[in-house]
Image (cartoon, rainbow, N blue to C red):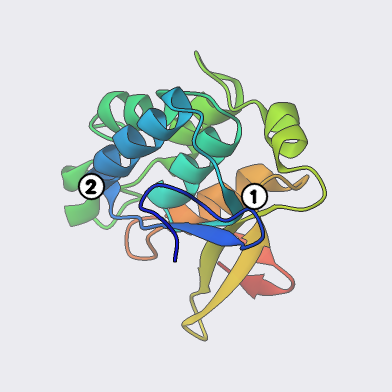
Amino acid sequence: MEKAGVFNQQQKYSLIVQGGGQKGAFASGVLDKFIDADFDPFSLYIGTSAGALNVSSFVAKQRGIGLDFILNYTTRERFFDMNKFLQKQQPMDLDWAFDFVNSGEFPLDLAKGKQNLGDDRVALACITDVEELKDYYYPIFADNWFDVLRATCAIPMLYYHDIEFDGKNG
């Protein structure tokens, strides 16, 4: 029997992080504490929406990115404009917000994320096909990482642009 807090190095552990917009602030805080404690026994990371962004910053060991994104970008009217929604215009400016993750004040360190994963760990984002309503999982630290993160965060009724993966729209 294992003692509480002791992890068997032979076993594999997964980290699954939910989305949910501003609720991602809690997960971000927990993962930042994991970084502080150098706690990372995981071999599989899966995130959806804000959870995928939190997984990304955790794997890259970039404390604070998830919370900063939630507090300083998703709360701005530029990110979501209710008036545009009511006028049936593009209400969610996900592209603007994800420019922060790409090249903003604290860009996601893709090279460090890939290095931290190595060959024996995998980080995936869950993307739902809007036509089939079926989930697919894509590597977060692949060459198309920007589209993967954007697609997992896109809400079909609020983000009108199609993001294509394997001939399907995410």
Does residue 41 sit above or below 29 in this rendering?
below
Who's the residue at 43% across and 23% down the image?
A: 36
- Identify the secondary structure beneath mark 2: helix
Other residues around mark 1 within 10 Å, as few (<14) / some (14–19) / many (≥20): many
Which label was assigned to residue 105? none
Q: Horizontally, is 36 left or right of 168 in the view?
A: left
Q: Quadrant of the C terminus?
A: bottom right
Q: Horizontally, is 131 left or right of 77 in the view?
A: right
Who's the residue at 33% across and 57% down the image?
A: 158
Determine the CA span between mark 1 and mark 2. 21 Å
Does residue 159 sit above or below 28 in this rendering?
below
Rendering coords of residue 144 (x, y %): 72, 48
The kind of residue tagged 2 is Lys
Which of these two is toward me, 10 or 60?
A: 10
Labelled pair 1, 2 in contact (Cβ < 8 Å): no
Q: Horizontally, is 97 left or right of 140 in the view?
A: left
Q: Horizontally, is 27 left or right of 53 in the view?
A: left
Who's the residue at 33% across and 29% down the image?
A: 67
- Identify the secondary structure beneath mark 1: loop
Which label was assigned to residue 23? 2
Who's the residue at 46% across and 32% down the image?
A: 96
The kind of residue tagged 1 is Ile
Q: Residue furthest top?
A: 105
Which numbered disc, 1 or 2, marks the residue that appears first in the sequence? 2
Does residue 145 sit above or below 113 in this rendering?
below
Other residues around mark 2 within 10 Å, as few (<14) / some (14–19) / many (≥20): few
Residue 59 image-quadrant placement: top right
Residue 12 image-quadrant placement: bottom right
Rendering coords of residue 33 (x, y %): 36, 30
- Residue bearing mark 1: 140
